[in-house]
Structure formats: C-alpha cells, structure tokens
C-alpha cells in the first residue's frame, strides 16, 4: 500500500491574487514544491546534517521589499545580522512579539494580510561533511520541522518551493542541487500569510524558523513512508504487528523473535503499552538502502460501550493542555526542556497531554511514548478570530481552504502516526464548524482506523468520536455524567471529556477536587485537561516576565497568556501541587478510628506493587518516625482495609496526626524510589483549647494603656507593642489584591467579584473608632468598618485580655446593611519591623492554600523566609496564604489561633500588591505586613470558567475569632 497517493497535499490547487513575486503569501494553498508528508523519525543509519545554528538574517518591513538576489550563490551577506535557528527573530532583538488571545492583529480580510508584513531573509552556507556519501549515491531531502508562518526556500539559487503550516514538517528533494562545498540555503520567512488565518491560537505571534532544519541523505532504496500498526488483544494477551512500508523491506524485533517482511502481520504474546506501563519493544525497519530504529508499543484504542478504551479498559484522563514554551526561546524548545515537561507531568500524576493547539516538536511524542502519557495530538488549526463576525468567511466552511486543511491534517497524521502515545487525533481548536472540518475528520478516519477523532467545536459530534467541551460548570458536567444533557442521538452515545478546564491563570485554579469527584463518580466522564501547562511569560529585565501589552502592541490580551500550572521558568505553581493531589492514583480513606484505613487502587492498568506505603504520626506537626503499612498489591479498582501499624503516641496535650504516604518502591525512569505519589492525613488527637489569658487589668499610663505585656495608644485604642516587639496598624482587613480568577473574564456574568468589590469600595474601607472601654478584665475597642458612599458596614469589636504574659485578642464582626457580595477575606492585619522579621515558622499547611485549592494542604511544622512565603504570580495578586494554621511565629511573636487561621506575611501591603502589574513593581518596605485571616473567599476558575462553588463563598455574616500573642525570647 502507499500512503503517498492518499495524501491530499498533491491535490492542492492554487487560488489567489494577482501574480507577483510574493503572491504565494496570500494564496490559500498550503504551498508548492514540498514532498508528500510521511512518518517522522529521529534517527536512521542514513547520514544527516543538522543545519541548526547561526544564520545570517535580514529583516524587511514588507514581503516584497527585497528581491531574491540574496538567494544567489556568491551573495555577500557579511553585513547582515545573525540569528539562532531554531528561533524566533522577535525574541532575538528584531521586532517585537505580539500577544492576542483570539483577535487577529490585522484586518480580517481573508486571505489578504497587511502590506506591513515583517519578512526575515535567512541565509546559511554549508559544506557537506567529509564522510557524506558521494553526491551520485541516492538523493537528499531538506526538512523544515517548523517555520512561522510562511517560507520560500532556495538552494544554490534554485527556488525549491514555498509552504505554510507553521508547526508541521515540510520536506524538499534537493539531492540534485547539492554540492560538496559552499551550498547556499536561503529561506525567506513572512510573519503574515494566508496561513495566519488558520493559526489564531491564543499565544504569542512569533515568526521565525523555530524548529530544526535538517539535510537527510536518502540512499537508493531508502525508506519513504511507513506505518507501524501494533495492536493488542487484551483477551489473548497477544500483539499483532504489521509495518506497512512504501519501500519493501523487513521488520525485526529481536525481543519478540520477529523477523517479517513489511506488510506481513505477525501475532505474538507481548506486554502491552499504556501510559502507566509504557512498554516499548525495540525493532528495526530495514530496506535495501536504510535501517530505521523502531520503538513499538502494542495497544488498541477503541470506542466501546460508549467509552474510550485502551486495551479493553476505559481510561480516565488526568490531563493537561501543553503549549510549547520557553521564557527566552519561545516555541523553540530543546530536547531537555521537552523532557523536563514530561518528567514534571509524570511526577505530578498527570497521565495525559493535549498538544494544544498544534502538533508539538516530534521529539516530544517520542518522550511521551517512552515515559508514558496519553496524547491527544491536535492539528495546527484555529480560526477563532472569525467569531467577531459571527463566523462569516470562516475558512473551515469555505471549500477554497479545504486543501490547506487537508494538508494540515495529513502532515500531522503522517508525521505522528507511529507513536503509541497518540491515542486521539484532534482536528484543531476553536475554529467554529464547517465542511472543511468534516473533510479533515473523514480523511483522518479513513487513513487511520486505529485512533479516535476529537474536536471540541463539534457539539453534535457529527465528525467526532467523543463529546468534548471546555470550562463547563460543575453542575452541567454532572448532568452530562448522568446522561441528562440531551443533545443528538449520536452524542448521547459518546463518552465525555473536558478538553479544557481549571483555568490556571494566576492564583488557582479552584474547584479541581470537585471536578475530580464527578469524573470518578460517572463512567461517561473520562476526565479532563487542565488549561494550561505553563505561563507564556517572556523573560524581560524590565518586568521579570513580560506579557501582552508589554511590547506596545496595538491590540493585546494582557496576562491572559500567563495561565499555566508552571511559572515561565518551569517552577511548579501551587496549582500544580494541588492538581497532583487531586488526581493521585491511590485513595486512602477513613479516619483510622477503627484501627484501619481503606486503600483503593485508582490506576487503570497497574497494581500497587510498585508502591511502598509509609505510615507515621506527628506531634505538634513534628513526625515521630515511620512505619510500613502493609498494603496488598491491589489490582486496578480494588480496595482493601489495611491495619494501622502502630497505636497513637501520647501527645501530652499536643495535637497528633497520622499520615500515610504512598511512595515509589523502586526507581522509575521519571522519579526515584521514595518519590511521593499519594498521601492522606488525619487528626487523631485534636489540640487543646487556647489559654483564656485573663487576669491582668488594663492600666492607664499617660497617653498609653498597658495590659500585661502590651501597650496601646490611649486615644486610638491601637496596639503599639507587645513586650519589645513594636506593632503597627493592627486592624480589621477585608481586602485582598484580586486574583485573575476574582477579576473574571470580560465575557463572564455579573459575578466578577474583583470589580464588584472595588465598586463597593472594599479596597478603601474606613475605620471609625466608636469607643475604647478599659474594664476590669479587658480593653474593648469598638469600631465600624465601612466604605465611603455605601451603607454597608462591619461592626467590629476588639476585645483584649492578658494573663500578664500572653495577650489575647477576640474579634467579633457583625455585618450591617444589605451585603450583596462576599468578602474577599476577613481577619486582622498588622505591621512588624522588617529589620526584625525575615522568616516565619508555623504549624499549618506547608504550601499556599485557599478554600477550594486546599486538597494538597498537608499539615506540618514548617518555616520559610518572608520571600519564600510569596507565590510569585507573573501578574502580582493575592497569594501565599497558609491554611489551617494553629500557630505561627514571626518577628518575635508567637501567635496561636482559635480557631485555626489563614496566615500570610509580605514586605508590602495588600494595596501595593493590588497596584503592582509585574513582579518588579513589588518593592520591599520597612514593614512586614502580617494577615491572620478567619476566612478567605474561594478562588474558582472564573478567569475562563466557573467562579468558586457557593460552598466556598465567604459571605458577610457574624463571626468571632481569637488569637493569643506571646513574645518569644
Ligand atoms: C480556550 C482556548 C485556549 C485558551 C483558553 C483561555 O477557549 O481554547 O486556547 O484561549 O480558552 O486561556
């Protein structure tokens, strides 16, 4: 069989404007001159020459500013600049990047693009290596793995073609043009082209040759296209291998004793491939002229009983959407960065990736095969900007563009079809609906019957094999899970995935655990993919990380481009830590009061024998030594009651918890033995009540009032010091610097609390002193806290008592008036001298947590510098709260809470945090500001999804909470 005749690329017809040297730029065709698409492979025994490196570079303002004389041999480019290939010229000092979410940064006039069309001429002169085969032996192919957005190529003065399809490979036959020395490769790259209309993904517009350029020797009889079909029959335990190759040859797999002709099927017992057990068999495809290493994974993907199954088992996707990103190199990623992504995913229990919204560098898929990740491979297609005109003229519903769409589908499928990790093809993202998409789906289904097809925009599932949505609210997801969502007959029979959810912009996303509960409760819900993997911040001296608007763009979408689970430098954000906990593959349940816990294997394919379970008690947050918990090697889905290995220690009045941790028992390729996979924690002995701290009497002392170790301002009632610790500005605080999720997105409804809070004036509360009462036992300060221009208020009473050593504060808050919005936070804040406050120790959650992002809030005794207490969101906002804090020690004070409190401390006020636009705006002052909160509003995901669920609201209602302060020595 031959895939090459089935490729639609050759059927492409040119349409377009007036003939000119650059008419191809606005031509809807995918290009001309390139070879048909075929399977991509990293290595073979045929020679290859990387043409990556430093290239000569000249930038022009328009597509036709320069003629093609630079492509001629002998052209002197000595005075040109240089750029690194792979790379984007706008990240190398030539022009600027532009960020828009869905708006085209040029007039929508398809297929025309602006006259101002940054055009980069690239030039590279190369010799063939000394051991390169004689030029008469076979041919050669020049491969471009990715060029944005349109390129025209000359080799040794000969025009060899032009192409579009930025994140897709293009190959040209060049053997007849090569010389031993002094080959001149000239590539003209246009930022804008007709192809740009198909590439309106929410990301930076970054022109350039951003993936590898390689010259491949093609010996006579070398491999052309080949398709590895490797299925697995879970009933017999056998795999069937058949490698179809355009050029006949043999296939060998020594580990399976396979040595067959291409095209010939062979069935043998095998271990199957899955994301959990990524068993690959090394083999070889040998034709007369070439040997190509194969990495074969046997697996069968099916749609059965309305479910996506692999090897007969329904899978639950715990996924993430991955754009390619590096804060310096943009989308030009090296292998190590790709590997880091895969390792980080595996270490955080992620089992699936959607390659939003284009096929990634092919090496990434090799890593997914090797380490084990389910992949939805998505085509390089998005036309979202047409939504602005109700999808009129949408290229996916215009037959003139269909050849380009089919070309893109073919280049993806042909390139990636030999990766076992790819289980689903996706037609693209946010491109509306239309005949072109149907044509793509039909072509893909015909070419590859071994995988399923996805496209979120197809609400009727006319072309797709699953019902897919994005940012669907929890209640609707639940209805879908219950099959109560209606829709077409076909859709009702299909499984459901959330191809995007949990918008990880800034602080958040909240509500992940609530989604996971639904996924686990309803079979039809086969999981989801958090949006998204990494913040696309650009390293920039001015701002630490730049985002939309920082390059003077005419149109931009600000920091909407920073919505990942990783910061731009790949440091995990608290959102990733939360996600890891929410999707952990082992459930450990029960409080242990009957001496047992229930352990459930949540993997789809593996038993638990690769895990060791560690059990430990902690007293006042300090571990007391570990025991082994004897958990049987449960099969997927099985549960067992497991006995706790040791009785609880006597906490001697301190709080006692136990923690069970599931750790890797052996080294794996992605993490070492001892790596924590899952955990749970329960309190056995709660802590005792806080001291009443009464007995001392407030004494007037000039303009001061003393109470035990504390001194207050007699006129204002403000606490001034406790022993030797100066305290400033202690008052009720309800303001937090709105998070991106508080602010919500412009298209969201009227529950965008960031702006509602501001409108009400919660960021400018006035504190009116009503009375100071110095009684027998207590100093009582009554205040009314309210914003100007409104009649809502919080009547707040501060009641101070002391036993001579300790100082106790009880705060009572009673709302007045008609509160229609929840509070951002509720607690007290005060300032301590920064000179005396560089770190804190506390017993509470080790990391950041909020009401709906607290699944991973593991209780521990912990310490951190004030700087480490900050979560450095690219756009500064509320961050860093520690949950369930029993006590904290900071700046010479030991503070206990009743009940537990949310603790944060920073070198700036919440107002300064609110005003900051970039990390570099945050400048430490002389004061460390401490917040002790009784409540925090939930986080939600409203920057592109639902806000917090009602149960995470901090509604204004009467509240009372206490703290006991003691000076430490
Ligand atoms: C989706 C889109 C993504 C991204 C996200 C918001 O609608 O598919 O590309 O824009 O919203 O960050």
Image (tube, grey):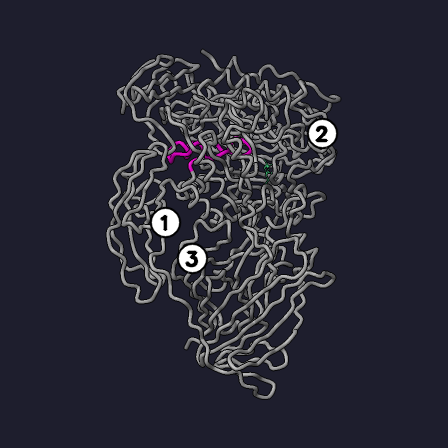
Determine which residue is flagged by label 1.
680
Q: Does the stretch in magenta take in 847?
A: no
Tell me the distance, in whole angstroms, between the alpha carbons under discs 1 and 2: 49 Å
Image-quadrant location for residue 796: bottom right
What residue is disc 2 on? Answer: 390
Extreme residue in the bottom direction = 702
Residues drawn in magenta: 351-374
Of the 4 image quadrants, the one containing the N terminus is top left
Residue 783 point in image, percent of width and height: 63, 71
The kind of secondary structure element at disc 3 is loop
Mark found first going from the N terminus, 1 or 2? 2
Q: Earlier in the sequence, mark 1 or mark 3?
A: 1
Q: What crowding class fits label 3: few (fewer than 14 Cα within 10 Å), some (14-19), or many (20 or more)? A: many
In the image, is the residue at mark 3 within 8 Å of ligand 1 by its beta carbon?
Answer: no
What element does badge 1 sit on?
Answer: strand
Residue to which mark 3 is pinned: 846
Q: Give the image location of residue 875, x and y in percent.
A: 59, 53
Identify the residue at image location x=71%, y=38%: 61
């Amino acid at each position: 069989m031959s895939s090459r005749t089935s490729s639609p690329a050759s059927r492409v017809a040119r349409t377009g404007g007036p003939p000119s040297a650059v008419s191809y730029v606005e031509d809807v065709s995918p290009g001309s001159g390139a070879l048909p698409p075929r399977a991509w492979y990293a290595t073979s025994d045929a020679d290859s020459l990387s043409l990556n490196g430093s290239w000569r570079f000249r930038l022009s303002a328009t597509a036709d500013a320069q003629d093609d004389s630079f492509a001629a041999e002998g052209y002197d480019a000595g005075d040109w600049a240089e750029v690194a290939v792979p790379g984007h010229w706008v990240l190398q000092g030539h022009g600027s990047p532009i960020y828009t979410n869905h708006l085209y940064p040029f007039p929508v006039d398809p297929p025309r693009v602006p006259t101002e069309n940054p055009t980069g001429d690239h030039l590279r002169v190369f010799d063939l290596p000394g051991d390169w085969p004689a030029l008469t032996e076979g041919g050669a192919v020049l491969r471009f793995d990715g060029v944005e957005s349109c390129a025209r190529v000359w080799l040794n003065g000969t025009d060899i073609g032009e192409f579009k399809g930025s994140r897709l490979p293009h190959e040209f036959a060049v053997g007849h043009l090569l010389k031993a020395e002094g080959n001149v490769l000239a590539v003209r790259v246009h930022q804008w082209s007709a192809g740009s209309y198909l590439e309106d993904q929410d990301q930076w517009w970054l022109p350039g040759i951003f993936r590898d350029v390689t010259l491949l020797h093609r010996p006579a009889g070398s491999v052309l296209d080949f398709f590895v079909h490797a299925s697995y029959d879970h009933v017999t335990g056998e795999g069937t291998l058949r490698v179809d190759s355009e050029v006949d040859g043999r296939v060998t797999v020594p580990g399976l004793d396979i040595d067959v002709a291409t095209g010939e099927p062979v069935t043998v017992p095998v271990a199957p491939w899955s994301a959990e057990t990524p068993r690959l068999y090394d083999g070889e495809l040998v034709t007369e002229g070439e040997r190509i290493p194969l990495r074969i994974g046997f697996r069968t993907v099916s749609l059965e009983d309305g479910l996506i199954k692999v090897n007969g088992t329904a899978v639950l996707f715990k996924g993430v959407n991955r754009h390619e990103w590096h804060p310096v190199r943009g989308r030009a990623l090296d292998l190590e960065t790709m590997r880091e992504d895969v390792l980080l995913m595996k270490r955080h229990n992620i089992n699936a990736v959607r390659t939003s919204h284009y096929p990634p560098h092919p090496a990434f898929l090799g890593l997914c095969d090797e380490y084990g990740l389910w992949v939805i491979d998505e085509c390089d297609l998005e036309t979202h900007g047409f939504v602005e005109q109700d999808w009129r003229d949408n290229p996916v519903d215009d037959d003139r563009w269909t050849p380009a769409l089919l070309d893109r589908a073919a280049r993806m499928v042909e390139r990636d079809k030999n990766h076992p990790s790819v289980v689903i093809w996706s037609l693209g993202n946010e491109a509306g609906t239309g005949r072109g998409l149907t044509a793509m789906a039909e072509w893909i289904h015909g070419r590859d019957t071994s995988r399923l097809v996805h496209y979120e925009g197809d609400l009727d599932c006319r072309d797709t094999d699953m019902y897919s949505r994005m940012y669907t609210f929890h209640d609707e997801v639940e209805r879908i899970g219950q099959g109560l969502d209606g829709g077409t007959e076909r859709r009702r029979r299909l499984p459901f995935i959330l191809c995007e959810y949990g918008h990880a912009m800034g602080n958040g996303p909240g509500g992940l655990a609530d989604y996971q509960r639904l996924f686990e409760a309803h079979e039809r819900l086969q999981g989801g993919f958090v949006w998204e993997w990494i913040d696309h911040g650009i390293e920039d001296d001015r701002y630490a990380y730049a985002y939309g608007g920082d390059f003077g763009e005419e149109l931009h979408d600000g920091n909407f481009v920073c919505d990942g689970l990783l910061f731009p430098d790949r440091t995990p954000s608290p959102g990733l830590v939360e996600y890891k906990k929410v999707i952990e593959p082992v459930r450990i349940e029960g409080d242990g009061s009957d001496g047992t816990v229930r352990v459930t294997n949540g993997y789809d394919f593996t038993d638990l024998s690769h895990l060791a379970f560690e059990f430990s008690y902690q007293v006042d947050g300090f571990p007391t030594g570990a025991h082994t918990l004897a958990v049987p090697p449960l099969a997927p889905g099985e549960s067992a009651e497991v006995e706790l290995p040791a009785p609880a220690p006597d906490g001697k009045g301190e709080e006692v918890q136990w923690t069970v941790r599931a750790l890797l028992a052996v080294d794996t390729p992605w993490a070492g033995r001892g790596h924590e996979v899952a955990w749970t924690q329960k309190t056995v002995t709660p802590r005792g009540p806080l001291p009443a701290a009464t007995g001392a009497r407030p004494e007037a002392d000039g303009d001061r009032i003393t109470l035990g170790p504390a001194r207050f301002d007699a006129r204002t009632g403000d606490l001034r010091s406790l022993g030797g610790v100066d305290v400033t500005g202690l008052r009720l605080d309800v303001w937090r610097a709105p998070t991106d999720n508080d602010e919500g997105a412009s298209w969201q409804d009227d529950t965008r609390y960031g702006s509602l809070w501001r409108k009400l004036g919660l960021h400018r509360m006035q504190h009116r002193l009503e009375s100071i009462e110095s009684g027998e036992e207590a100093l009582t300060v009554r205040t009314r806290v309210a914003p100007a221009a409104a009649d809502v208020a919080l009547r707040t009473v501060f009641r101070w008592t002391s036993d001579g050593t300790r100082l106790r504060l009880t705060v009572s808050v009673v709302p007045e008036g008609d509160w229609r919005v929840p509070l951002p936070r509720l607690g007290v804040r005060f300032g301590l001298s920064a000179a005396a406050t560089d770190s804190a120790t506390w017993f509470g959650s080790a990391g950041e947590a909020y009401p709906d992002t607290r699944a991973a809030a593991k209780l521990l005794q912990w310490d951190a510098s004030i700087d480490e207490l900050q979560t450095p969101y690219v756009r500064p906002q509320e961050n860093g709260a520690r949950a369930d804090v029993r006590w904290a020690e900071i700046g010479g004070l030991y503070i206990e809470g009743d009940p537990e409190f949310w603790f944060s401390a920073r070198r700036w006020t919440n107002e300064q945090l609110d005003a900051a636009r970039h990390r570099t705006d945050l400048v430490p002052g002389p004061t460390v500001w401490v917040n002790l909160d009784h409540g925090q509003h939930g986080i939600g995901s409203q920057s592109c999804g639902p806000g917090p669920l009602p149960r995470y609201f901090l509604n204004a209602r009467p509240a009372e909470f206490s703290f006991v302060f003691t000076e430490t020595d």
